[in-house]
Image (cartoon, rainbow, N blue to C red):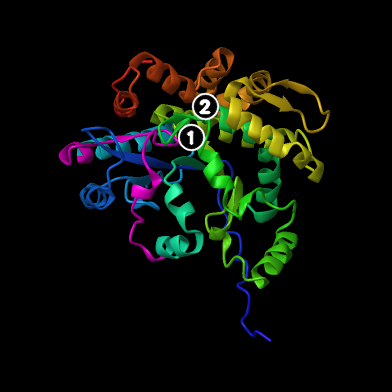
């Protein structure tokens, strides 16, 4: 009998309710043909010399870099920190004759050309997942929301799950893969779904119950820690947060901050009004709704979990924004929410901008160049 002891679930740290933090995975591209460029080491060395909020770290492959804010109390604070990080990234990239850009996928990179970043965890993942690891050269935004205790975090997690399609459609920026229009607004998430520990968290509403589930799972040896779960939303006990992981990286930091403001406003609505009790049956339509949002973006159909009503996702987003508007005003997120309302009303997301740019320019490299200018804050539209 194996005497190895399964790892225990760590205790849930306290954090202030409604604090937020944002992580952005970004593309490094050369300025010759705008393909991905393996310059993360050089970028990290240059960035380390600049005093900045949050953190800058490597990601799975060496053409990626991740920036993170610290703990913020408003989406304007998020935007302030992301602005400092973005401006430093742009200066460092200019020194290396490369560029940084958002977007959930690079439109024409070849996965087999990517290099795994030399870090023990990334090497272990590469050994375990094979070619999927290089195909994980995709770029997402993660939003953390502070929760005062573990049980309220799980309640928040399952309430947020109803809005996964909204998050996907509003952030979608990955229509092109390997030089082709995939016909998805968010093709990035198809790469995430290939991993066995992706999907959604088990339906538990107490940390004790979650701990029992975690113990059973770790006893199998399939997972060793919370890091092994690639769920759409997962608890982060060491931070005292839940982490929403379905957003594509937007093309601008303004959009990234607006999405964080939306999440924060939703969380405030949940806490103040307790609008509904999540239940396991919510997940009967979860996979369908998520697929619709990935495939069709703001033109998707949304199935309301309780009533089974089918309606345009765009319409449900607008209804939701109306409900959270008073809380957004209190949090100073009203401008952020209004920008998302405008997107939903006009069915405009970053995937649409990318397609329209490609339709006009007929050259994917030029589309990437214009995306990099957008990231700098220079481009219009």
Q: Nearer the N terminus, badge 2 or badge 1?
A: 1
Which of the numbered marks, if any, corresponds to residue 74?
A: 1
> Is 276 displayed left or right of 195 in the figure?
right
- Say what secondary structure mark 1 lies in: loop
Quadrant location of the C terminus?
Answer: top left
Residue at disc 2, secondary structure: loop
Residue drawn at the location 45% of the way across and 64% of the way down: 127
The residue positioned 78% from the left and 33% from the top of the image is 305
> Residue 62 at what x, y percent from top left?
32, 51
Nearest the camera: 326 or 264?
A: 264
Q: Is residue 213 magenta?
A: no
Q: Residue at x 75, y 28 (%)?
A: 303
In the picture of the structure, the residue carrying the numbered disc 2 is 333
For label 1, the crowd category at 10 Å Cα-Cα, with few meaning under 14, some 14 to 19 and many 20 or more, is many
180 or 69: nearer the viewer: 180
Q: Position of residue 237 (x, y in %)?
A: 58, 58
Question: Can residue 19 be seen from the camera position used here?
Answer: no
Q: Is residue 11 found left or right of 354 in the rendered image?
A: right
Q: How many neighbours does mark 2 have within 10 angstroms: few (below 14), some (14-19), or many (20 or more)? A: many
| Residue located at (21% from left, 33% from top) | 32
Are the two marked residues, 2 and 1, in contact with CB atoms closer than 8 angstroms? yes
Q: Is residue 358 visible?
A: yes
Q: Which residues are magenta?
A: 92-120
- Asked whether residue 98 is drawn in magenta, I would say yes
Quarter containing the N terminus: bottom right
Above or below, comparing residue 164 to residue 225 in the picture = above
Q: Which mark is drawn over residue 257? A: none
């Amino acid at each position: 009998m194996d005497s190895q002891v399964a790892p225990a679930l760590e205790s849930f740290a306290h954090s202030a309710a409604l604090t937020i933090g944002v992580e952005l995975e970004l593309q490094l591209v050369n300025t010759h043909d705008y393909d991905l460029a393996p310059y993360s080491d050089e970028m990290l060395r240059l960035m380390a010399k600049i005093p900045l909020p949050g953190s800058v770290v490597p990601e799975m492959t060496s053409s990626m870099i991740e920036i993170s804010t610290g703990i913020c109390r408003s989406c304007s604070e998020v935007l302030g920190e992301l602005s400092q990080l973005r401006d430093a990234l742009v200066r460092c990239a200019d020194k290396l004759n490369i560029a940084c850009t958002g977007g959930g996928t690079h439109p024409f990179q070849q996965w087999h050309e990517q290099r795994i970043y030399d870090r023990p965890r990334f090497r272990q993942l590469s050994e375990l997942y094979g070619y999927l690891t290089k195909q994980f050269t995709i770029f997402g935004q993660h939003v953390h929301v502070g929760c005062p205790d573990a049980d309220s975090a799980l309640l928040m997690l399952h309430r947020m799950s109803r809005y996964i399609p909204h998050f996907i459609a509003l952030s979608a920026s990955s229509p092109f893969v390997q030089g082709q229009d995939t016909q998805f607004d968010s093709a990035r998430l198809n790469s995430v779904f290939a991993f066995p520990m992706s999907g959604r968290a088990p339906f538990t509403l107490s940390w004790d119950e979650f701990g029992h589930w975690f113990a059973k799972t770790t006893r199998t040896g399939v997972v060793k820690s919370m890091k092994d779960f690639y769920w759409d939303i997962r608890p982060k006990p060491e931070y005292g947060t839940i982490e929403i992981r379905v957003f594509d990286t937007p093309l601008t930091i303004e959009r990234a901050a607006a999405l964080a403001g939306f999440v924060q406003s939703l969380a405030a609505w949940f806490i103040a009004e307790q609008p509904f009790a999540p239940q396991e049956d919510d997940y009967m339509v979860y996979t369908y709704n998520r697929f619709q949002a990935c495939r069709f973006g703001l033109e998707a159909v949304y199935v309301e979990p309780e009533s089974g009503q089918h309606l345009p996702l765009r319409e449900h987003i607008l209804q939701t924004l109306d409900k959270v508007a008073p809380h957004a005003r209190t949090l100073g997120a009203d401008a952020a929410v209004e920008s998302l309302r405008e997107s939903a009303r006009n069915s405009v997301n970053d995937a649409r901008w990318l397609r329209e740019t490609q339709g006009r320019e007929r050259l994917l490299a030029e589309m990437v160049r214009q995306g990099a200018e957008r990231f700098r804050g220079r481009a219009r539209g």
